[in-house]
Image (cartoon, rainbow, N blue to C red):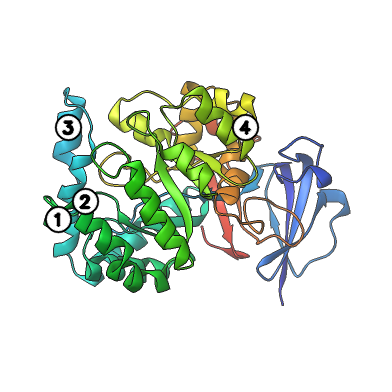
């Protein structure tokens, strides 16, 4: 198996304090990384790097773990430009706009949906993302939800069943009937393709009792819960996520003190995943990352890439927003976009650069990871390795 040494790294973020400077980022200055196959074989000072079959000179650039995007909605067709334009002209955001994407997605062919998915994955990879979660939720029929998950599963192992995105337009007058479909025939068809089950627990989507029924049924089918929680208003989503030991409570924009305490108490089980692209694109209230971090919660950052409320695939952009508007330091934001995302996916093999981890990393055209927030909007990612292979 061919080994590759990436040498002359100016600043290496490992997210492993045991091999770095003792901080959560585990920084090593003047560093090197050795890749063996699809795994990290060695990290440390460049002058102590073992010999390798091939060498890549980083020329003093910073290296970071590949971003772990633990929340996206990439199996869809069409866009919602008109809705965005209207919202930026004063109309408020609600859950109902999803129906526009449902209609376009149902009308698309499998090939069209897959091509769109691949295009967005390639776009994200060029910006340093190497692990992707994505969901269904724009079909809302048994056949359309199953095909969305089948298409997604061909491109990532992190696939989420979100039949409970909104009540299907076909069941507008019978939400209980739709919950029965989501927890019955649709779940049976979708579970073989998914690892996770999710629900949009929100006014205009599903209430706490409906969400509990959906997540409990998903768990009984072998899927692990995660929850769209407390995005548009205060509600039961966070408490439900903690109660059911969900891997993540996502959005977490409107939190009571009890919600924050619950997430802090469940820090080893349920990650608070913050999605600043949604607040940017809807002009909504920013999540208070500082409040969560100071309480002791585990925080992840993700893009929420979707055509309606957060049409960005850029983790660097989300880092910049989190630092500027959510009270995070550059170090905390990077950790949350890498190791935090890995925690939200219950993964230990990604989100860090350490022996035995998957060889996913990005080089920045900058001397430090701080430039991700310091130079917002600048395409700083100059090279990406995914599973040990140079991908960008």
Label 1 vs label 4: CA separation? 43 Å
Label of residue 171 in the image: 1
Who comes first in sequence, dot 1 or dot 4?
Answer: 1
At mark 1, the secondary structure is helix
Mark 1 and mark 3 in contact? Answer it, CB < 8 Å: no
Residue 154 seen in this snapshot: no
**Residue 350 as seen in the image, left or right of residue 47:** left
**Residue 118 as seen in the image, left or right of residue 112:** right
At mark 2, the secondary structure is loop
State the residue position of label 3: 85
Label of residue 339 in the image: none
Comparing 159 with 220, the one in front is 220
Label 1 vs label 3: CA separation? 29 Å
Mark 2 and mark 1 in contact? Answer it, CB < 8 Å: yes
Label 2 vs label 4: CA separation? 36 Å
Mark 3 and mark 2 in contact? Answer it, CB < 8 Å: no
Who comes first in sequence, dot 1 or dot 3?
Answer: 3
At mark 4, the secondary structure is helix
Comparing 240 with 253, the one in front is 240
**Residue 122 as seen in the image, left or right of residue 114:** right
Comparing 372 with 337, the one in front is 337
Comparing 166 with 73, the one in front is 166
């Amino acid at each position: 198996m061919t080994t590759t040494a990436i040498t002359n790294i100016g600043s290496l973020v490992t997210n492993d304090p045991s091999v770095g400077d003792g901080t959560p980022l585990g920084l090593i200055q003047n560093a090197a990384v050795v890749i063996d196959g699809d795994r990290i074989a060695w990290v440390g000072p460049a002058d102590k790097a073992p010999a390798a079959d091939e060498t890549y000179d980083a020329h003093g650039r910073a290296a970071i773990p590949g971003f772990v995007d633990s929340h996206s909605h990439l199996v869809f067709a069409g866009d919602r430009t008109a809705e965005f334009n209207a919202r930026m002209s004063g109309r408020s955001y609600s859950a109902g706009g999803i129906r526009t994407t449902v209609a376009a997605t149902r009308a698309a062919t499998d090939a069209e949906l897959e091509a769109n998915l691949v295009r967005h994955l390639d776009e994200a990879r060029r910006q340093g993302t190497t692990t992707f979660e994505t969901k269904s939720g724009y079909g809302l029929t048994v056949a359309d939800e199953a095909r969305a998950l089948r298409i997604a599963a061909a491109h990532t192992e992190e696939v989420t069943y979100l039949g409970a995105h909104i009540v299907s337009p076909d069941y507008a007058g019978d939400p209980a009937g739709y919950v029965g479909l989501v927890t019955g025939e649709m779940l049976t068809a979708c579970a073989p393709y998914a690892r996770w089950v999710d629900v949009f627990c929100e006014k205009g989507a599903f209430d706490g009792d409906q969400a509990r029924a959906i997540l409990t049924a998903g768990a009984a089918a072998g899927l692990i819960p995660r929850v769209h929680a407390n995005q548009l208003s205060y509600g039961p989503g966070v408490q439900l996520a903690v109660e059911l030991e969900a891997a993540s409570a996502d959005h977490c924009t409107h939190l009571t003190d009890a919600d924050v305490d619950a997430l802090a108490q469940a820090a080893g089980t349920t990650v608070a995943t913050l999605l600043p692209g949604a607040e940017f694109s809807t002009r909504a209230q920013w999540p208070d990352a500082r409040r969560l971090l100071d309480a002791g919660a585990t925080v992840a950052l993700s893009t929420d890439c979707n055509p309606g409320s957060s049409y960005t695939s850029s983790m660097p952009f989300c880092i910049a927003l989190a630092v500027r508007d959510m009270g995070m330091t550059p170090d905390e934001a990077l950790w949350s976009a890498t190791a935090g995302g890995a925690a939200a996916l219950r993964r230990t093999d990604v989100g860090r650069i350490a022996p035995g981890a998957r060889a996913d990393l990005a080089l920045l055209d900058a001397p430090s990871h701080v430039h991700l927030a310091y130079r917002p909007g600048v395409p700083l990612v100059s090279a990406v390795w995914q599973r040990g292979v140079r991908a960008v």
